């Protein structure tokens, strides 16, 4: 099976995004890059360099909803009439459902000041401009096969980075296209999201992410192709490094929580004092994910101060 990796500009601090063209029948693009003229131009040149045209693409698999990965899917679908596939938990937002109102209660319960919420809202609107509504999407579920004339990929639902993130596994050579679930040089950020099964709750992103990582570990992949940066060829070391990083962050957060407890926003400011502007949303996502995971592990306890959540060390650890 021939798979080409293309690096497409994003205009974001993360740098380029890796997208993949499976050069088999049916011709399939895995992720697309953002909805920017320079990204479309780069993708067109890359596809032509592989001996095809954008018009030839028959399928698009979107690994997750973030615009740097999905933003050009609607454009390519119009150009080629390709079928777009994504996990159902991502589909509503990819179709254009604006879920920012679903974020508001999550942010308010976290104790985020109103003026910061407005900063987040403006940043969210800016990121949304890198995407475009995809009106026709087919669902793919865990265990589905993406078949080609020669070979296939198995869909792995790997929630964590987003609720509906998927990886594509090729059993023939134990290779994995993992998008942002596994990145060589970037720490994973389980992004704050409403729970797709109950929008008034938070998705338990870090706990789910670690389960997904353990599932990938069981497959013993030979090489992992990520969404940014180089491949990962030693997943065992990568997995252990990730677990140590979580343990270290848990210990640091435990040391920062005052005796009377702190809101997620207060904990975020203490944990990431240098985070500014929209980057504070990623810092808040990381903090909340760590707090939720710490509660599930019995390290922290959750209570409420009015309408705001408060977290403290569990008794015996104070």
Image (cartoon, rainbow, N blue to C red):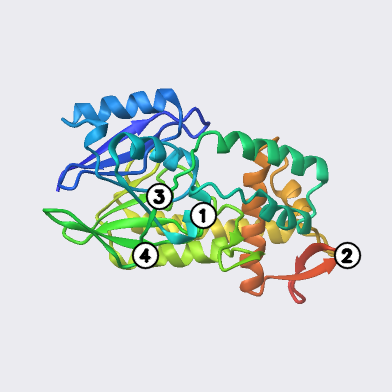
The residue lying toward the viewer, choosing from 171 and 314, is 171
User: What residue is disc 2 on?
Assistant: 306
Badge 4 or badge 2: first in the primary sequence? 4
**Which type of secondary structure does the marked residue at label 3 adopt?**
loop
The image's mark for residue 13 is none
CA separation in Å, label 4 and label 1: 15 Å
User: What residue is disc 4 on?
Assistant: 141
User: What residue is disc 1 on?
Assistant: 92
Give yes or no for contact between labels 3 and 4 (Cβ–Cβ under 8 Å). no
User: What residue is disc 3 on?
Assistant: 136
Q: Is residue 173 at all visible to an observer of this figure?
A: no
Q: Give the residue at x 63% y 40%.
A: 124
CA separation in Å, label 4 and label 2: 40 Å
The residue lying toward the viewer, choosing from 125 and 252, is 125
CA separation in Å, label 1 and label 2: 32 Å
Nearer the observer, disc 1 or disc 2? 1
Viewed as shown, does residue 205 lie left or right of 2?
Answer: right
Viewed as shown, does residue 113 lie left or right of 59?
Answer: right
Across and down, in percent, residue 231 comes to 32, 44
Badge 1 or badge 2: first in the primary sequence? 1
User: Neighbour class for label 2 at 10 Å: few (<14), some, many (≥20)?
Assistant: few
The residue lying toward the viewer, choosing from 59 and 14, is 59
Nearer the observer, disc 2 or disc 3? 3
Quarter placement of the C terminus: bottom right
**Which type of secondary structure does the marked residue at label 2 adopt?**
loop
């Amino acid at each position: 099976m021939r798979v080409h990796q293309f690096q497409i500009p994003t205009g974001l601090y993360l740098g380029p995004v890796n997208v993949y063209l499976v050069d088999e029948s049916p011709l399939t693009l895995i992720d697309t890059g953002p909805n920017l003229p320079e990204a479309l131009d780069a993708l067109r040149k890359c596809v032509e360099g592989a001996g095809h045209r954008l018009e030839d693409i028959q399928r698009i698999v979107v690994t997750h909803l973030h615009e740097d990965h999905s933003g050009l899917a609607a454009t390519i679908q119009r150009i080629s009439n390709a079928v777009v596939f994504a996990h159902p938990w991502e589909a509503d937002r990819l179709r254009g459902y604006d879920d920012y109102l679903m974020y508001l209660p999550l942010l308010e319960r976290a104790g985020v000041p109103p003026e910061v919420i407005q900063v987040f809202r403006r940043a969210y609107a800016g990121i949304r401009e890198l995407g475009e509504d995809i009106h026709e999407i087919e669902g793919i579920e865990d265990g589905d096969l993406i078949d080609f004339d020669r070979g296939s990929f198995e869909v792995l639902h790997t929630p964590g980075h987003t609720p509906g993130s998927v990886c594509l596994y090729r059993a023939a050579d134990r290779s994995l296209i993992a998008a942002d679930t596994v990145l060589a040089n970037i720490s994973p950020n389980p992004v704050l999201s409403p729970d797709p099964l109950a929008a008034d709750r938070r998705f338990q992103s870090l706990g789910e992410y670690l389960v997904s990582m353990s599932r990938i570990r069981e497959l013993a992949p030979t090489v992992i192709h990520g969404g940014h940066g180089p491949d990962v060829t030693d997943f065992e070391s990568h997995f252990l490094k990730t677990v140590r990083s979580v343990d270290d962050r848990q210990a640091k957060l435990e040391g920062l929580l005052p005796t009377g407890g702190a809101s997620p926003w207060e904990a975020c400011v203490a944990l990431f004092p240098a985070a500014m502007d929209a980057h504070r949303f990623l810092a808040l996502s990381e903090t909340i994910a760590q707090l939720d995971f710490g509660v599930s592990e019995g390290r922290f306890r959750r209570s409420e101060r009015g309408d705001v959540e408060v977290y403290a060390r569990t008794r015996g650890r104070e």
